[in-house]
Image: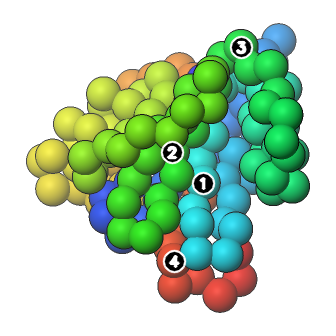
Amino acid sequence: MTTIAYDGKTLAGDSQYSGDYKYYGRGKMFKLGPVLVGCAGNSEDVAAFHDWYLVAGDKKPEINALSVLIVEDGAAYKMEEKLVRFELKIPCAIGSGAQFAMGAMLAGKTAKEAVEIAAQLDTGTGGEVITLTLSDENN
């Protein structure tokens, strides 16, 4: 799946996609104005969510395996298959390595460090760790 973590300052996620083989890309995380978004799930559902969320489509896509972490206005929210948003306590993490990342953040690690630790323990997490912050100009 993947690991996405938020520590109150930084949203971090791995770049590994898994299927018949592993490949890497940046498409799991994006910034839309003052909103940070990280997606964990199969690549088709991530793409369907991305298209729906970016164009603010009225009709929700049919999703089978997806978890989304959204950072907006100082709060963190999670969405799953029904695309209903609910608030999470910060720090928070989603995806197959979420428990490893949460343990790391509760032990004082940053979101980026937490995803790096999760990648050592979770086979669904790997590759470059991508980070986004609200102050990033280039994202």
Q: Are marks 4 and 1 in contact (CB under 8 Å)?
A: no
Disc 4 designates what residue? 134
Where 53 sits versus 21, above or below? Answer: below
Q: Give the residue at x 52% y 85%.
A: 135
Quadrant the C terminus occupies:
bottom right
Q: Are marks 1 and 2 in contact (CB under 8 Å)?
A: yes
Disc 1 designates what residue? 37
Dot 3 or dot 4: first in sequence order is 3
Dot 2 or dot 3: first in sequence order is 3
Identify the residue at the far front of this view.
58
Query: SS for tag 2?
Result: strand
Identify the residue at the far left of this view.
107
Report, in whole angstroms, how far the alpha carbon at label 1 lies from the one at label 2.
Answer: 6 Å
Query: SS for tag 1?
Result: strand
Report, in whole angstroms, how far the alpha carbon at label 2 lies from the one at label 3.
Answer: 16 Å
Disc 3 designates what residue? 64
